[in-house]
Amino acid sequence: MIRRRQGGRRQNLETAELNITAFMNLMVILVPFLLITAVFSRLAILELNLPGPSTEPADPQDQLFQLEVIVRSDRIEVGDRNQGLLGIYPIGDDGEYDFQALSDKLVELKDRYSEKTDASILLESEIAYDTLVQVMDRVRIAERIEDDAIVRRDLFPDISIGDAPIDGGA
């Protein structure tokens, strides 16, 4: 029922009902779709092992070799936490890290310690994220070309990340 006011405008006295059927249909389709795609997006994430407090005594076999890759602003150091440095790879003349030499050393270490799957990557505070990703890729997988095909080999897929110790030599 419409009636005129004094100002000449009309006023609707009946309230309209909201029809939310179309919105509910959209939600019925959208919610399962979002839940399904959330599972696929998780597959692309690399899971890292963060060091935590441990009260259990360490296995003496694990104390033998603990791989550490330390990324500094001017070099990459590969070492054993218990024995010390095993290799130092300085930045080349082009200003890039020597990732190929790092890969060769990691393959050599994997041949020597074939059962070892964990490694720690320690970074100085000013290291670029792209450098971290490249080092992680080299620590996890070694690639070589064989018969016109790329052959991948797992090296140390269980990666922990932390802060590099303060450099005493610089």
Image (cartoon, grey):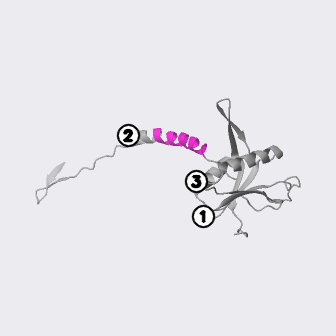
Residue 14 locus on image (x, y percent): 24, 49
> Residue at the location (66% across, 52% down)?
98
Question: In the image shown, does 23 or 111 lie closer to the viewer?
Answer: 111
Few, some or many residues within 10 Å of mark 2 (<14, 14–19, 20+)? few
User: Which residue in the protein does label 2 denote?
Assistant: 22
Residues under labels 3 and 2: Cα distance? 46 Å
Counting residues from the start of the chain, the first of labels 3 and 2 encountered is: 2
Q: Is residue 19 left or right of residue 29?
A: left
Question: In the image shown, does 42 or 17 lie closer to the viewer?
Answer: 42
Residue 168 locus on image (x, y percent): 73, 70
User: Which residue in the protein does label 3 denote?
Assistant: 130
Residues under labels 2 and 1: Cα distance? 52 Å
State which quarter of the image contains the C terminus.
bottom right
The span shown in magenta is 29-44
Do the residues bearing badges 2 and 1 touch, measured as CB atoms within 8 Å?
Answer: no
User: What amino acid type should be assigned to the residue bearing mark 1?
Assistant: Glu
> Residue at the location (57% across, 41% down)?
40
Do the residues bearing badges 1 and 3 touch, measured as CB atoms within 8 Å?
Answer: no
Q: Tell me which corner region of the image, top left, top right, bottom left or bottom right, holds residue 65.
A: bottom right
Q: Is residue 105 visible?
A: yes
Q: Secondary structure at mark 1?
A: loop
User: Which residue in the protein does label 1 denote?
Assistant: 126
Residue at the right extreme? 60
Q: Is residue 107 left or right of residue 59?
A: left
User: What amino acid type should be assigned to the residue bearing mark 2?
Assistant: Ala
Mark in the foreground, 3 or 2: 3
Q: Is residue 69 visible?
A: no
Q: Is residue 133 left or right of residue 139?
A: left
